[in-house]
Amino acid sequence: MSLKACCHPQAVRGKFVPISKKTLTMEELLKDMIKNTQYECEEEHRKIISAVNGMAGIHIIEVIVDTLVIFLLTCFELNVI
């Protein structure tokens, strides 16, 4: 990150801030880069949590279906249905 900040004071995420805007100090640039990186990490973390919750839901459905199949097979064997 510091290498990217050191190449040019207007460089942010590989893009240049238009010259018409106020030039950022090195400290402001680093704070902005840290804030953007933190936001990106939080977004990726949300994606991971969402995927894990989805997998947990699928597991619950599979367990319910497996239990139902065992119950129905037992009922068929007992000629209850």
Image: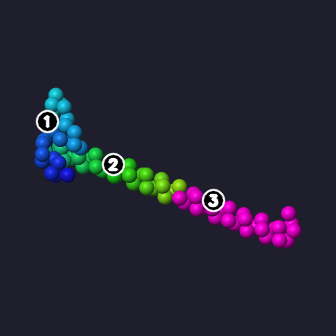
**Which residue matches tag 1?**
23
Residue at image location 15% in from the left, 31% down from the top: 19
Residue 77 left/right relative to 18: right
Spot occupied by residue 24 in the image (x, y as percentages of width and height): 15, 39
How packed mark 1 is, by other alpha carbons closer than 10 Å (few <14, some 14-19, many 20 or more), is few
Q: Which mark is residue 61?
A: 3
63 versus 11 height, above or below: below
Q: Are marks 3 and 2 in contact (CB under 8 Å)?
A: no
Task: Give the Cα distance between marks 1 and 2.
Answer: 24 Å
Based on the picture, tell me whether residue 57 belongs to the magenta stretch.
yes
**Residue type beneath disc 3:** Ile
Looking at marks 1 and 2 on the same chain, the residue that comes earlier in the sequence is marked by 1
**Judging from the image, what secondary structure is the residue with disc 1 in?**
loop
Residue linked to disc 2: 40
Amino acid tagged 2 = Glu
Q: Main secondary structure of the magenta part?
A: helix
Left or right? Give the position of 59 relative to 10: right
Query: Helix, strand or loop at disc 3?
Result: helix
* Residue in view at x 87 percent, y 68 percent: 79
In this orientation, which residue lies closer to the viewer: 16 or 33? 16
The amino acid beneath tag 1 is: Thr
Question: Can you give x and y, in whole percent of width and height, for residue 65 in the image?
Answer: 68, 61
Q: Can you give x and y, in whole percent of width and height, for residue 55 in the image?
A: 53, 58
